């Protein structure tokens, strides 16, 4: 496996949204060059300087400050769907190689470059806007069945990152709840919700409430 690193930093601006209830979307992320500042955002904000969040009810905020997707998984989707998927197409802020965010533990911490530390929080849940940007109505089911949603992360230590920065896992909590498992429980195996409590100290509030329903 390649050395874990960031191969693309992607930010989005407002554009028309024909696929959801909001007038605009910022899902169409594009790679940028140079240093990008990472900070802990407020409600509905992005953790990346220059990145816009259109739907603050369902995206952004402290627990979803940064979205990461692996180039290896994008390549697999390219092969499966017969389409070209450039970095940023899934709306991810960071495209990576050499690290599997789906098998990361909830609460795991990653150092990126010399300064930034991020903490894994929860999976991406597909929506109609995401489906419309990919292959249409069947996409949500396909994405869910595949079970490789990619992780959101919160900002533990702010700073600057650059394309090519290494990624190092600097903390792993003492439980077994991965992002992939959390995704399956949230989407298709809700009867297992109590299993989420093993990671109660690290779960976002909405997932903790779900676990206690």
Image (spheres, grey):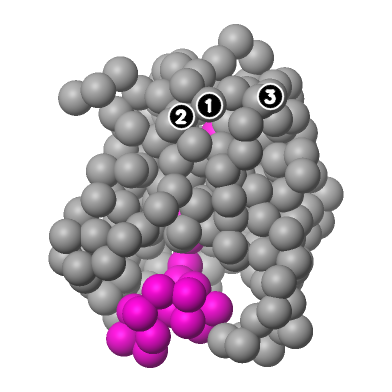
10 Å neighbourhood of mark 1: few (<14), some, or many (≥20)?
many
Residue identifier under label 1: 163
Left or right of 83 in this view: 165: right
Image: magenta residue range: 119-139
Residue identifier under label 3: 35
Residue at horizontal 67 percent and vertical 34 percent from the top: 155
Q: Nearer the viewer, residue 1 or 50?
A: 50
Spatial CA span between label 1 and label 3: 8 Å
Left or right of 29 in this view: 60: right
Spatial CA span between label 2 and label 3: 12 Å
Residue 196 percent coordinates (x, y): 41, 55
- Circles 1, 2 touching at the beta carbon (< 8 Å): yes
Vertical placement of residue 74 versus 23, above or below:
above
Residue 120 percent coordinates (x, y): 50, 39
Left or right of 136 in this view: 66: right
Vertical placement of residue 60 versus 94, above or below:
below
The first of marks 1 and 3 along the sequence is 3
Residue 6 is tagged as 2
Vertical placement of residue 18 versus 97, above or below:
below
Quadrant (top left, top right, bottom left, bottom right) of the N terminus? top left
Label 2 element class: strand
Residue depth check, mark 1 versus mark 2: number of the one nearer the observer:
1
Residue at horizontal 30 percent and vertical 38 percent from the top: 100
Residue at horizontal 83 percent and vertical 49 percent from the top: 42
In which quarter of the view is residue 82 placed? bottom left
10 Å neighbourhood of mark 2: few (<14), some, or many (≥20)?
many
């Amino acid at each position: 496996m390649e050395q874990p690193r960031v191969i693309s930093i992607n930010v989005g601006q407002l554009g028309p949204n024909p696929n959801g209830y909001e007038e605009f979307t910022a899902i169409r992320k594009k790679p940028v060059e140079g240093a990008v500042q990472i900070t802990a955002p407020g409600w509905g904000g992005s953790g990346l300087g220059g990145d816009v969040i259109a739907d603050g009810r369902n995206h952004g905020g402290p627990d979803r400050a940064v979205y990461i997707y692996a180039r290896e998984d994008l390549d697999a989707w390219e092969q499966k769907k017969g389409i070209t998927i450039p970095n940023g197409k899934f709306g991810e802020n960071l495209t990576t190689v050499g690290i599997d965010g789906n098998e990361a533990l909830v609460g795991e911490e990653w150092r990126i470059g010399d300064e930034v530390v991020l903490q894994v929080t929860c999976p991406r849940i597909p929506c109609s806007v995401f489906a419309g940007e990919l292959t249409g109505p069947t996409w949500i089911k396909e994405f869910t069945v595949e079970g490789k949603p990619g992780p959101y992360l919160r900002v533990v230590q702010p700073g600057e990152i650059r394309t090519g920065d290494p990624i190092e896992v600097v903390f792993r909590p003492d439980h077994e709840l991965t992002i992939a498992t959390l995704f399956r429980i949230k989407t298709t195996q809700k009867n297992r919700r109590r299993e989420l409590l093993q990671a109660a100290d690290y779960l976002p509030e909405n997932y903790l409430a779900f676990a206690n329903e």
